Image: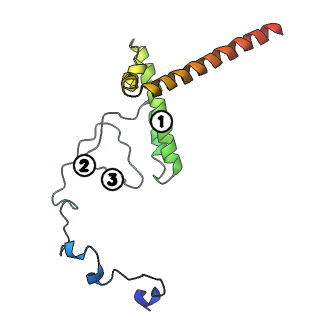
Amino acid sequence: MDNQQKYAHIPGWGADLDEANRPAYPMERMPARLEGLHWSDPPEPQPQRIEVLCSTERPNMTPVFGTSSPPRGLSGSLRRYAFRHSENDLRHWLVLLLADRIDCGEGLIEDLSQGHVPNIYSEMGGNAELRHNPMGAARKALVVGAVIGLVALSMRNSRRHRRLR
């Protein structure tokens, strides 16, 4: 029993078998274009001077790769752990997200250790938001002020509660 008979009970199956019924048939080229799909002469690979993490799905190195931020510190350890898992595993992506957040913290600590105090407001686009979305900036300022006020109030109440004991 061939596939045509095997699946004939499925409505619409095999509708594209006849080339005359294919919507894209007049645009198809025979033979199909393969330009850029395969290298006739693969480029010389980029020299690997730093650690580059590779996916388990694609274990071979690509000819060109980024070297701007090699894995380092706790975030680098988390990235190495993430790349032990397949890309279809949720752990891979969640650990990479966590590593990104930790890398931000490591960057802040590194800046402070070198005597540079980062301007977090400007680096996160505060000036642009104030210029282009003033209502959103005001809402964020109110939320941040309310959170700071609640934290200060709870700390004050906890001190007062400790004194009364």
Residues marked 3 and 2 touching at CB (< 8 Å)? no
Within-10-Å neighbours for mark 1: few <14, some 14–19, many 20+: many
Q: Residue at x 78, y 12 (%)?
A: 161
Looking at the picture, tell me which residue is in the foreground, 117 or 58. Answer: 117
**According to the image, label 2 marks what residue?**
63
Kindly report the distance in space between the C-alpha atoms of the residues bearing marks 2 and 1.
26 Å
Nearest to viewer (mark 1 / mark 3): 1
Quadrant for the N terminus in the image: bottom left
- On the picture, is 100 further left or further right than 162? left
> Colour scheme of this structure image?
rainbow
Earlier-in-chain disc, 2 versus 1: 2
How far from the left and from the top, in percent, is residue 118?
40, 17
Kindly report the distance in space between the C-alpha atoms of the residues bearing marks 3 and 2.
9 Å
What is the secondary structure assignment of the residue under circle 1?
helix
Q: Residue at x 22, y 47 (%)?
A: 45
Query: What residue type is disc 3 on?
Result: Asn
How far from the left and from the top, in percent, is residue 158?
73, 14
Furthest toward the top, the residue is 163
Residues marked 1 and 3 touching at CB (< 8 Å)? no
**According to the image, label 3 marks what residue?**
60
How far from the left and from the top, in percent, is residue 110?
42, 20
Query: What residue type is disc 1 on?
Result: Ala
Looking at the picture, tell me which residue is in the foreground, 46 or 31. Answer: 31
**According to the image, label 1 marks what residue?**
99
Q: Residue at x 29, y 81 (%)?
A: 21
What is the secondary structure assignment of the residue under circle 3?
loop
Kindly report the distance in space between the C-alpha atoms of the residues bearing marks 1 and 3.
24 Å
Quadrant for the C terminus in the image: top right
- On the picture, is 81 further left or further right than 49? right
